[in-house]
């Protein structure tokens, strides 16, 4: 199995995605999705942004490497009666126009699109935010990541082999505590900044 596929099929990312649903809906509203627009959502998971885009009338194809998330996405689409939303398995790293460089770095994004003949003048950037909202203390959200999020599960597997699982747990709990913006101790709200890229063609 492709190691990326194994990573994202591990655990249950849908449980983590539940903490980002409101942010997915807000993002789709901000970028101006409307009826009749064709949307390709790469690395879509179970549809945190694909589903609200389809609800606004766009024709949406969600592509993810994890079969379990593709299945979960198609179930969500059927549950909401969205015939304009389809999920299928695919690996975004196989796209020839995507060299192995970080999407979060503006110069790398410009270089990628320049390779496809797109002028840097047509590319704009905005730092946007997804917020992880969880009805429990930050330490409980760490536990969710430890039990259900593939990359964190792998990190703990390695830490346990080296006798450092407790150390990793404490480091993550301290990190989540420091980033928590919720005024309540029994709730978690952690903003995560990402680079939103708009290309005018």
Image: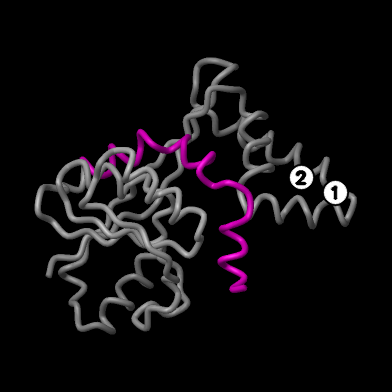
Expressed as whole percent of the image width and height from the top left, the position of residue 96 reads 37, 83
Label placed on residue 168: 2
Task: Please tell me how crowded label 2 is: few (under 14), some (14-19), or many (20+) other residues with Cα within 10 Å.
Answer: some
Q: Is residue 143 above or below residue 165?
A: above
Does the magenta-highlighted stretch encompass residue 19? yes
Label placed on residue 164: 1
Image position of 60 (left or right of 168): left
Expressed as whole percent of the image width and height from the top left, the position of residue 9 reads 58, 57
Q: Secondary structure at mark 2?
A: helix
Task: Please tell me how crowded label 1 is: few (under 14), some (14-19), or many (20+) other residues with Cα within 10 Å.
Answer: few
Image position of 13 (left or right of 63): right
What residue do we see at 38% from left, 78% from top? Answer: 95
Q: Is residue 53 above or below residue 60?
A: above
Q: Is residue 23 above or below residue 4?
A: above
Is label 1 in contact with label 2 (beta carbons under 8 Å)?
yes
Q: Which residues are magenta?
A: 1-29
Comparing 186 with 49, the one in front is 49
Q: Secondary structure at mark 1?
A: loop
């Amino acid at each position: 199995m492709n190691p990326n596929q194994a990573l994202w099929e591990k655990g249950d990312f849908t449980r983590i995605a539940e903490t980002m649903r409101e942010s997915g809906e807000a993002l789709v509203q901000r970028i101006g999705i409307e009826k009749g627009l064709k949307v390709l959502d790469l690395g879509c998971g179970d549809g945190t942004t694909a589903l609200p885009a389809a609800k606004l009338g766009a024709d949406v194809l969600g592509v993810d490497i994890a079969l379990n998330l593709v299945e979960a996405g198609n179930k969500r689409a059927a549950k909401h009666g969205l015939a304009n939303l389809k999920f299928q398995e695919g690996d975004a790293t196989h796209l020839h126009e995507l060299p192995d460089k970080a999407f979060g770095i503006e110069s790398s994004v410009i270089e990628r699109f320049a390779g496809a003949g797109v002028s840097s003048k047509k590319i704009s950037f905005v730092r946007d935010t997804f917020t992880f909202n969880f009805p429990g203390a930050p330490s409980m959200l760490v536990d969710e990541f430890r039990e259900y999020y593939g990359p964190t599960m792998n990190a703990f597997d390695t830490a346990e082999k080296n006798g450092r699982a407790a150390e990793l747990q404490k480091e993550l709990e301290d990190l989540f505590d420091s980033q928590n913006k919720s005024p309540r101790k029994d709730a978690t709200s952690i903003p995560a900044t990402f680079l939103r890229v708009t290309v005018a063609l």
